Image (cartoon, helix red, strand yellow):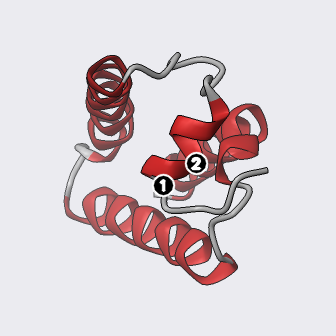
Amino acid sequence: MWMTLAIAATVYSLLNLCFGKFEDETPLLPRVLKLVIYLSITALLAWVGPWALLWVLGLLAAGSVVHWVWCAHNGINPLSAEPKERYYRLRSWRPA
């Protein structure tokens, strides 16, 4: 179980390092809650059976597909979040 949690935390950390810049205006509490919920579900699945790594990879794949579709639908580049004005408006943030 500890190895599974370590892998999940590493994946989360690496992705947060790469894509965390797109969460600039998100308050701290939702970001921390997302991490706690993600690791809690991973720990529960690791405790129940060998399904935890499928959860980690499946969530990553599903999130990527939803992200690309949402960005394409809203006219935003999925890798650079440009145009920034439109991205910030969709996130209900103030313009930079």
Q: Which of these two is toward me, 54 or 38?
A: 38
In the image, is residue 34 above or below residue 63? below
Q: Amino acid at mark 1?
A: Arg
- Please tell me whether mark 2 sits on a helix, a strand or a loop: helix
Circle 1 packing at 10 Å, graded few (<14), some (14-19), many (20+), is few
Q: Amino acid at mark 2?
A: Tyr
Q: Quadrant of the N terminus?
A: bottom left
Q: Which of these two is toward me, 65 or 39?
A: 65
In the image, is residue 18 above or below residue 91? above
Residue at image coords 51%, 74%: 36
Residue at image coords 60%, 27%: 81
**Residue 75 placement (x, y as % from top left):** 39, 19
- Judged from this view, the residue extending furthest toward the bottom is 29
Q: Quadrant of residue 82?
A: top right
**Residue 31 placement (x, y as % from top left):** 59, 69
In the image, is residue 59 above or below residue 92? above
Relative side of 34 to 55, left or right: right
As drawn, the label of residue 88 is: 2
Q: Label 2 vs label 1: CA separation?
A: 5 Å
Residue under numbered circle 1: 91
Residue at image coords 20%, 63%: 48
**Residue 35 placement (x, y as % from top left):** 54, 66
Q: Quadrant of residue 44?
A: bottom left
Whether the residues at callouts 2 and 1 have beta carbons within 8 Å, the answer is yes
- Please tell me whether mark 1 sits on a helix, a strand or a loop: loop
Q: Which of these two is toward me, 48 or 73?
A: 73
**Residue 16 placement (x, y as % from top left):** 69, 44
Residue at image coords 50%, 50%: 89
The mark total stands at 2
